[in-house]
Image: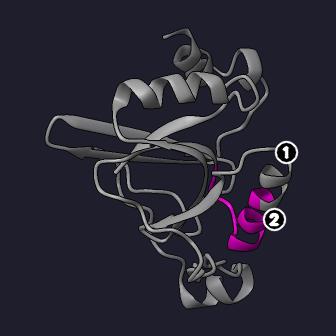
Amino acid sequence: MEYFNSFLMNTGKWQGKTWNAIGIAIYENYALAWFGDVPDPEGAPDVCGREPQKPASKADSAVKAKPVLKPAPVVVDPKASPLSPGKYYVIVKSQVSLDDANKLVLDLNAKGFKDARVLSSDNKIRVSIYEAADRTEATKLLNEAKKSFRDAWLLKN
């Protein structure tokens, strides 16, 4: 609980961090929030109970127009492994380019993480160092991974 509180309150290792984007999703009994360093290229969201921001007129936009950066499409490497149903993966890096992920895997292999590999799903590239068939084993592997990768987390497919 303290980890999440420090994240939300910008204390501890998060002190001084500026969040420029937020995403929220709710599905059935689950809720998810994510925070990002990079501003959302779609701009500010409409806030419930407030007037939506009016788009600038063409005259204004000619003067004040800023280029909108679109995220580059993810090109899936045919060597990237698909996720196996029901498996748990210990993720040590996500939100990374395919090139960076492949370089990281080579580095991890050289450091003894022989099961390190690039995973691709839902147009997301992640780097996994362990996989497990059940939660108990996955939790043990995650605890081991956290000795070297404090932000490691579990992904269940």
Q: Residue at x 70, y 27 (%)?
A: 150
User: Which one is earlier in the sequence, the residue at label 1 or at label 2?
Assistant: 2
The quarter holding residue 8 reads top right
- Looking at the image, residue 80 lies above or below residue 110: below
Q: Which residues are magenta?
A: 93-105
Q: Position of residue 113 (x, y in %)?
A: 73, 45
Secondary structure, mark 2, is: helix
Amino acid type of the residue tagged 1 in the rendering: Lys
Q: Position of residue 125 (x, y in %)?
A: 58, 64
Left or right: residue 79 versus residue 32 is: right
- Looking at the image, residue 18 lies above or below residue 137: below
Q: Main secondary structure of the magenta part?
A: helix
Q: Residue at x 48, y 11 (%)?
A: 1
Q: Nearer the viewer, residue 20 or 106?
A: 106
User: Does the stretch in magenta take in 100?
Assistant: yes
* Residue corresponding to mark 2: 103
